[in-house]
Image (cartoon, rainbow, N blue to C red):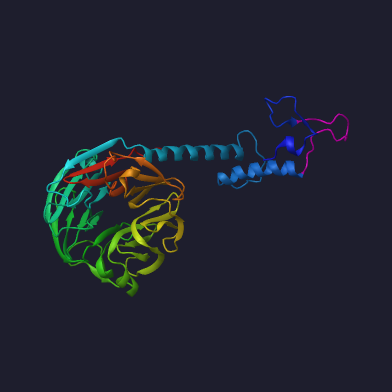
Amino acid sequence: MLNPAAAYPDQIDTTDPTGYPYGRAKNSVTLEDGTGTPLEQQWVSDLFGSQQALLAAAELTPSGTPDKVGASQHLDAIKIVADARTKLALQKSQALNWPERGSFHNSGDYASPNGVLDMAWAPDLGIGGGGRYVLIGPGNTAGCNTWSSEDCTQWDFGGLLSAAEPDNPCVAYGRINGTPGFLMTWASPIGYYSSINGTSWGSVSETVPAHGVACYSSSLNMWVIAGDSGEIRTSLTALAGSWTARTTPAGWIAGCGGVKRVIFANGLFVILPKGIYNKVLTSPNGITWTERTLATGTWTGIAYSSTDQLWLAIGIGAGVYSSANGTSWNFVTSSLASMNDLACSGPVWVATTNNGSFGGIAYSTNKGANWSYVAVGNHRVATAGWTRILGADGRFMVAHATGAVCEVALSARAMG
């Protein structure tokens, strides 16, 4: 904005420096004597610029009708901008406040103080259909332990499922032959488990990709399991005998090193490689798959925000990349420390970091450009922070395993 004292030093009233520290307008002493504050181009342009900047910030288009009491676009713009900033502050509180904690003794023992695990949430299961969380991780010798909870503080043990020791276990929520349920994959290329309640599991004998990672698209009514050697299979029911092998590019087969994450959002499947690779794999239908250039790195997390209308991918040695369409990716920053996973809620992005000295949690509210760290849990000891993060039910849940104990933390629920 213009500084009247600098723009019109001899044509303003400076008798009230408290009320008008930069001066106020004054009239001419006599007609056209040049002593009054002029109504000129730069003064009017400054006023127009302020008004138009306010409308632009509120994403409003001028109506063409002069403002008046009861019909003022400028007042509407002020309310919109103020409400948006207030809502962002409330949403940001999710990343800063983690009031609920839970821990339970794992049946067996994780091989390392930061054992692999995964978790999912079903919005329509649990008591009264109020939602249910499922968490899985390796057991004492060979197999997956399953746990479930409705509040993330009290966890029920669902048993040790007989399977090969997982190194990238996956549990995903979707529809099992039309019924809400979970699908669990692990290391073996023969078989997987399914559950329609999150507490009891049944084995399904079927050839699926080794070290498969599963994902469900509700709009396509389709399951995808992707794994080693670029192998992908899809199914509409997740029943035995229903899976169809899909063709993937030769480059992906040779370079992906397996699959780290699979998600479906904004009409697109996006798959992160498990190995050090510079591509992601995308498909709008689960049938035709295309490689997209990202950057060389060890990619660990991917998420989509419908609020920001943006994809973010994070990786070790590559930093943060963004995409408006999931196919063309752009570098954002390398400032984020080593991380394990990524989730978002509205415009709030939260990553679990790979280093406990950073508190285990990093968050961004400006599309990944800047990240701040917050301590969640006791990270004064040498841990590797939190392993996984889940964005669901208007909040975040993080989890990690420390020896034979699994710990979880639940953020405040989104407001506004």
The quarter holding residue 39 reads top right
Q: Relative to 118, is 88 above or below?
A: above
250 horizontally vs 85: left or right: left
Residue 408 visible in the picture: yes
- The front one of 30 and 352 is 352
Kindly identify the residue that appears in the image at 42 percent across and 64 percent down: 327
- The front one of 341 and 198 is 341
Q: Position of residue 97 (x, y in %)?
A: 35, 36
Q: Quadrant of the N terminus?
A: top right
Q: Position of residue 80 (x, y in %)?
A: 53, 40
Residue 280 visible in the picture: no
78 horizontally vs 394: left or right: right
Q: Position of residue 36 (x, y in %)?
A: 82, 33
Q: Main secondary structure of the magenta part?
A: loop
Q: Relative to 323, is 357 above or below?
A: above
Range of the magenta residues? 25-40
